[in-house]
Amino acid sequence: MTGMSIEQLAAASGLPADTIKTLEHNEADGEPHALLAVKDALEKAGIIFIASGNQDEGGPGVRLKTRSAADEGIRPENLNAANDD
């Protein structure tokens, strides 16, 4: 959903890439700190984790945060030399 590679997620979470691979294969028994580190990194990247009791957001699962107009940057029709950074 975020487009992050294993290496990028490892860097964002402070974990080794091998730990991320282990988590991907659902072999993380005994590593709750690793799960929390990945969850925190994914939340910072724009992922929202929805619990099963929260039906307001469409049920349990993961979602991307809704982007606001401010997140979209400058629309192509508004590009000009004045906003050329």
Image: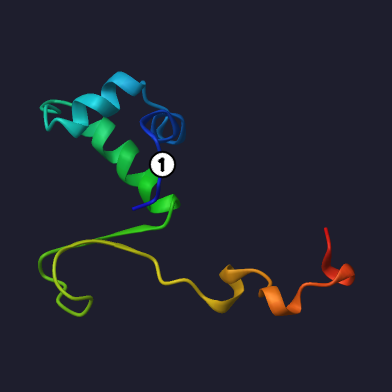
Q: Residue at x 46, y 30 (%)?
A: 11
Image coordinates for residue 69, horizontal then vertical, percent: 56, 78
Q: Quadrant of residue 52?
A: bottom left
- The relative height of residue 19 versus residue 84 in the rendered view (above or below) is above
- The relative height of residue 75 versus residue 84 in the rendered view (above or below) is below
User: Mark 1: which secondary structure?
Assistant: loop
How many badges with numbers are in the image?
A: 1
Image coordinates for residue 81, horizontal then vertical, percent: 89, 68
**Residue at image mark 1:** 4
Q: Residue at x 20, y 31 (%)?
A: 23
Q: Quadrant of the C terminus?
A: bottom right
Q: Quadrant of residue 82?
A: bottom right
Disc 1 marks a residue whose amino acid type is Met
Left or right: 67 as drawn, with respect to 38: right
Image coordinates for residue 12, horizontal then vertical, percent: 45, 36
Q: Residue at x 39, y 66 (%)?
A: 65
Image coordinates for residue 66, horizontal then vertical, percent: 41, 72
